[in-house]
Image (cartoon, rainbow, N blue to C red):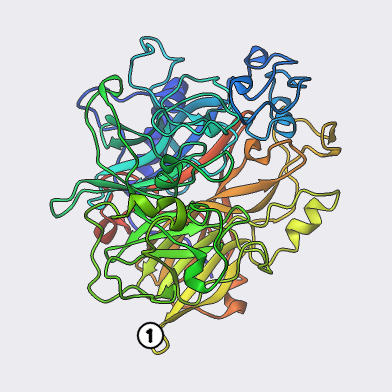
Amino acid sequence: MNLTHTVSKSFAISMAALAISLPASAQGFGFAHDGDTQFFPGNLVVSRSVYDNNPNNVKVGTILPPNCSNTTGGCSATTGAPYNGLYPFVFNNDIYDANFGITSAIYLDQITPFGWLINSLEVPNSSQRGIKSFSNQLVTSFSSKSELALNLSTDGRVLTFMGYVSPIDAIDISNSNTPAAVDPTNPVGLNTYRAVATVNSKGQFTFTETNAYSGNNGRAAILNNTDGSNAFYTAGNAGNGSNPQPDGIVLGAGAQFITPSTAPENSQTPGTPTPLASFSVTKLGDKADKIGKDDNFRGLTIFNDVVYFTKGSGSNGVNTVYFVDTTGTACPKGVGVPAVGAQLPISPLAYDPTTLQTTGLPNNICILSGFPTALAKTANPVAAPFGLWFANADTLYVADEGDGYTGGADLYTHAAAQTAAGLQKWVFNSATSTWSLAYTLQTGLDLGTPYTVARYPTGNNPATNLPWVPATGGLRNMTGQVDHDGYVTLWAVTATISGNGDVGADPNRLVVIRDQLKNTDTTVAAKEKFVTLREARYAEVLRGVSLTPGTDVAHDRHDYDHGYDNR
């Protein structure tokens, strides 16, 4: 059976014609002019970053992390960085300096749902003409694989994402402190604001600085701008020093509540971080972790006025799916489902500053019933949930990154044998109020199958003695839509495994699949196949994917032809 849509061919043809008519420069690095439309409803936006591949970015022998000698955290070693700034060898420095990363430019690529590039919007950065040190700008850390998730606001009119207020080519910014939450035990002796960005359909940006996520990174953000609300909910991690962590680190971890700003970056003075929510494994009866480390969140979504998070990294806490309980009644023992009539948070989490260092923040986050509750350090199989998307109240798709194993020459065969990696479909049983895993979509992902990238090295990386060539290891950020033929279409960015010193710097892919919404039969699901829509090129990475601002999912999702067959 051919699953290709054939609805409204004229829309697909017009979008294709627009992409073809654009000059190469516009397709790669275009800007919207005032009053012009940058993003058209019914398309996709993919966040992408490009490393500038300058050998002078790192001098061989440079002592890292930056300014480490002036911190109590100390330096990685006295011998200095073994590799210069040439890609991909530069990311072997991660073996020497565990904090290693280099800031790079962010691009927002608009593509049709079947993968044709329409245009690309470059987020302001220091490499552009006219951008000064005091100008609005935002960058990402090139090898930080958990960054640059894209989410639509609750009214669907703007996209949100997170980054750093820094010039490009800055080293180890992703583990720097924030200016008002300095941890002297953090070996990275730099202070850098994180910021939440919004962009509307005309390509107009706002940037809101924050002192949250000191020592680590902000990963995802959603703007709640309906019914009189005006707040960002964000996901990330904090801390890169010793225990106990300063108050600002504990307060700036995990889930944050941030008030948007429209002021220029250079006139903003963000204060103490304001947490949105927190979780502790003590709710499950487990021994307490390092305060704040259970809140190492990655994925973020909102459905039916409930905020959901995923945690899928680190050895602390539970790698699973969570939700914020604004009622205080949904999960007295740490596991449950959202209460009927729950509302979105309208203010930060209240806490007692006198007990912050002893008991941490109050617990108002729950594990979604049916999802894993085993501690990450003992869980088998390893769960690594990343992006998540609700098709309806009874169907939740979760992208699983895979376990990321690169510990030996069996890295490819190990990735191919994973059972949890890929796109998991979970269904809700209203009789038991529990979610269960229906199946995991993997066909066409080619888990563990190496693929070549032009100009990318082959053979073994001398720093790891493992193959340079990447292979898909799972999925990271994702989005989807419900179609009118009983199927859902799901787009996701792939995770990789390789012998690179930092697999977050591997060129990865954007993939798509269609799944029969009501199906729970694994035999039927096995016939559904992922199709690769885009491949990152040399010195590129893909990070997030979202529908375009202004897309009316309820009415416009049938107005284009996907143009692929994924049987």
Determine the residue positioned at 41% across, 26% down. Answer: 165
- In the rendered structure, the answer to whether residue 507 lies left or right of residue 156 reads right
State the quadrant of the C terminus.
Answer: bottom right
350 to 260, vertically: above or below: below
> How far across and down, in percent of the image, does residue 107 sit?
45, 30
> How far across and down, in percent of the image, does residue 279 sit?
44, 61
- In the rendered structure, the answer to whether residue 135 lies left or right of residue 488 reads left
Do we see residue 62 in this rendering? yes
Q: Nearer the viewer, residue 226 or 373?
A: 373
| Residue type, mark 1 in image | Ser
Which residue is situated farthest in the left direction here?
228
Q: Which residue is mark 1?
A: 430
Q: Quadrant of residue 360?
A: bottom left
Which residue is situated farthest in the front direction here?
354
Determine the residue positioned at 65% across, 12% down. Answer: 56
Q: Nearer the viewer, residue 157 or 120?
A: 157
Determine the residue positioned at 74% across, 37% down. Answer: 500
Asked which secondary structure carries label 1, the reply is loop
> How far across and down, in percent of the image, does residue 562 sit?
44, 54
> How far across and down, in percent of the image, does residue 222 sit?
33, 48
Q: Quadrant of residue 446?
A: bottom right
